[in-house]
Amino acid sequence: MKKIEAIIRPAKLEELKTALENIGVRGMTVYDVKGRGLQGAEKQYYRGQEHSIDLFPKVKLEIVCQDESVENIISQILKTCKTGKKGDGKIFVYPVERIIRISTREEGGAAL
């Protein structure tokens, strides 16, 4: 099993959730986060004062899935979230050693 973490633009969340649901992915955890990568700092003005913004709002999705689903999920994330501009985000894939559903004590793929 694998854990996929994707950092994406907040505006893409609803579209991505729909795309993932269409391929059978329902379970996910979503966080509101801030971060920076290749994007440079932006200058913004608030009440006449210049401010440098270098942490941008993002959304982090975590999905745990069977090994055979990884490429399909990654493909959907790339297709849905790519705008071609800096700040589109990143995808990370990690191995998962064990999953246990607390309510039933099911383990492995049955716990997904």
Image (tube, rainbow, N blue to C red):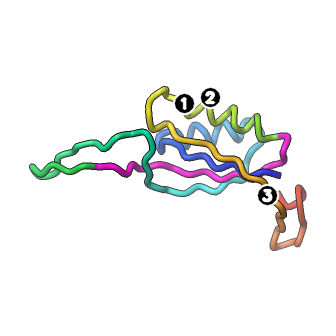
Residue behind mark 3: 96
Q: Is residue 15 above or below residue 112?
A: above
Residue beneath disc 2 = 79
> Residue at image x 54%, y 57%?
31
Tell me, yes or no, whether the highlighted magenta stretch contains residue 79. no
Q: Position of residue 83 (x, y in %)?
A: 49, 28
**Are there few (<14), some (14-19), or many (20+) residues within 10 Å of tag 2?**
few
**Span colored in magenta:** 53-68
Comparing 43 with 23, the one in front is: 43
Q: Are marks 2 and 1 in contact (CB under 8 Å)?
A: yes
Q: Amino acid at mark 1?
A: Lys
Q: Nearer the viewer, residue 34 or 110?
A: 34
Residue flagged by tag 2: what amino acid is it?
Lys
Q: Which secondary structure class fits the magenta region best?
A: strand
Q: Residue at x 43, y 48 (%)?
A: 36
**1 or 3: tag closer to the N-terminus:** 1
Under circle 3, the secondary element is loop
Q: Is residue 7 left or right of residue 29?
A: left
Q: Gap in Å between the C-alphas at discs 1 and 3? A: 27 Å
For disc 1, the neighbor class at 10 Å (few under 14, some 14 to 19, many from 20) is some
Name the residue beneath numbered marker 1: 82
User: Residue at coordinates 73% horizontally, 52% vertically from top-left?
Assistant: 94
Mark 3 or mark 2, which is nearer to you?
Answer: 3
Q: Hey, what amino acid is under mark 3?
A: Val
**35 displayed left or right of 91:** left
Q: Residue furthest left?
A: 48
